[in-house]
């Protein structure tokens, strides 16, 4: 498990902020002949960070600049990646055109905030870059018509560690960030991916999606229902992020699949299932097994269990279907959070991938 350091956590910068800094430096060099290094940009909330350039090149009608992505203390897969931007002068009246270079993906499925066929550069970073270009153009009396091509070294390989392939973003990473700032351990990128996955599934016409806590439960629910990959949502610990977004953007049918410990916490009303933010209540589990007819000795042993897995083992040895009861109560939590017309079922999945508990339609 990744642990937070025992010191104040350092903020970082999104790929969108890095691309904006590189674009501003490159266009500034095109207009003046010199690169600003470090280069200062204005973020959507008014912050003005400075970025050192890792690469620069000025040619006939174009300029290139690069920034190394610094995610601060966040365990971001793109930390240390080199974000390169090439700015070329375009025909008068052409405006600002965005292109995907090496390591930046292209959208191939509907439901994303960018159209199919467009480079995976989200609206907020596009707006930041357009504003930076417009400000420089105004300062120099230039028209501001440019082509911006963004590349990320090794981006295609890094994208395999993200949701991008499942979201239909092929060829590399996305340029993201609404504020330009990465907050350490905010997990905003993961929750954003959950939301994007729901949007893509809805736009693709799927009436049944599944949120899973991990790879084993995802494989189990995929096999159980024969679901296609775009209908599978890697919710991880963020049950609340999944359920609350579906409340506003419903689908006809949701399946939640996960291990016994994670779903026990959902059954007990927790929407954040991470071990540092919620814990299994063994007194409550003992009450559950008491309701299933366990004797006093078993109830006492379960109350003193060290882990959820040990509690489950004790119940199974006594022939009691504790996993089914956990599934039923987890479903009740989910339905209360959905508060709509989405029907829901829950699968509890063992470590070997077997479905050991089920509740719902």
Image (cartoon, rainbow, N blue to C red):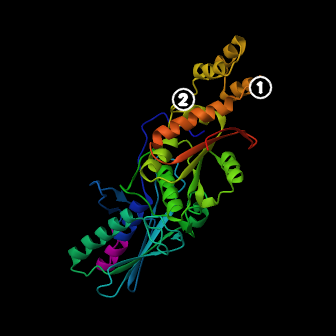
Tell me the CA gap for discs 2 and 1: 22 Å
Magenta part, dominant SS: helix
236 in relation to 86, above or below: above
Label 1, residues with CA under 10 Å away: few <14, some 14-19, many ≥20: few
Q: Marks 2 and 1: which is nearer the front?
A: 1
> Residue 11 or 266: which is nearer the viewer?
266
Instruction: Looking at the image, tell me whether mark 2 or mark 1 is earlier in sequence order.
Output: 2
Instruction: Assign the C terminus to one quadrant of the image.
Output: top right
Q: Is residue 26 magenta?
A: yes
110 in relation to 210, above or below: below
Whether residue 275 is visible here, answered yes or no, is no
Residue 104 pos. (x, y %): 52, 69
Q: Is the C-beta separation of discs 2 and 1 under 8 Å?
A: no
Q: Residue tagged by mark 2?
A: 268
Q: Is residue 343 magenta?
A: no
326 in relation to 292, above or below: below
Residue 165 pos. (x, y %): 59, 63
Label 2, residues with CA under 10 Å away: few <14, some 14-19, many ≥20: some
Total marks shown come to 2
- Specify the quadrant of the image occupied by residue 134: bottom left
> Residue 340 or 275: which is nearer the viewer?
340
Seen as rendered, the residue at the extreme top is: 296
Residue drawn at the location 56% of the way across and 60% of the way down:
206
Whether residue 184 is visible here, answered yes or no, is yes
For label 2, the SS is loop
Residue 124 pos. (x, y %): 36, 62
Which region is colored magenta? 25-36
Q: Residue tagged by mark 1?
A: 319
In the image: residue 278, left or right of residue 182: right
């Amino acid at each position: 498990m990744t642990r937070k350091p025992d010191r104040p956590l350092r903020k970082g910068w999104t790929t969108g902020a890095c691309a904006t800094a590189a674009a501003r430096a490159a266009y500034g060099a095109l207009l003046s002949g010199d690169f600003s290094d470090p280069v200062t940009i204005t973020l959507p909330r008014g912050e003005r960070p400075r970025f050192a350039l890792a690469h620069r090149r000025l040619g006939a009608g174009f300029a290139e600049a690069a920034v190394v992505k610094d995610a601060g203390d966040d365990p971001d897969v793109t930390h240390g990646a080199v974000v390169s931007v090439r700015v070329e002068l375009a025909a008068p009246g052409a405006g600002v055109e965005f292109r995907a270079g090496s390591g930046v993906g292209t959208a191939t499925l509907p439901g994303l905030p960018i159209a199919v066929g467009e480079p995976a550069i989200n609206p907020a970073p596009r707006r930041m870059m357009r504003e930076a270009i417009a400000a420089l153009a105004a300062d120099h009396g230039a028209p501001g018509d440019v082509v911006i091509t963004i590349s990320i070294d090794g981006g295609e390989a890094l994208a395999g560690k993200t949701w991008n392939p499942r979201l239909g973003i092929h060829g590399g990473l996305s340029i993201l960030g609404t504020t330009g700032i990465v907050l350490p351990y905010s997990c905003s990128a993961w929750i954003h991916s959950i939301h994007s996955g729901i949007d893509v599934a809805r736009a693709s016409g799927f009436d049944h999606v599944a949120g899973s806590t991990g790879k084993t439960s995802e494989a189990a629910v995929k096999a159980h229902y024969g679901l296609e990959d775009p209908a599978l949502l890697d919710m991880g610990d963020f049950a609340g992020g999944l359920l609350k977004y579906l409340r506003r953007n419903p689908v006809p049918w949701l399946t939640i699949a996960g291990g016994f410990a994670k779903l026990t916490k959902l059954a007990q009303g927790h929407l954040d299932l991470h071990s540092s933010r919620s814990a299994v209540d063994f007194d409550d589990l003992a009450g559950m097994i008491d309701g299933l007819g366990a004797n006093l000795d078993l109830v006492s042993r379960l109350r003193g269990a060290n882990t959820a897995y040990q509690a489950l083992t004790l119940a199974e040895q006594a022939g009691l279907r504790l996993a089914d009861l956990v599934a039923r109560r987890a479903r009740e939590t989910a339905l209360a959070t959905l508060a709509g017309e989405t029907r829901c079922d829950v699968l509890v999945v063992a470590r070997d991938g077997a479905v050991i508990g089920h509740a719902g339609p």
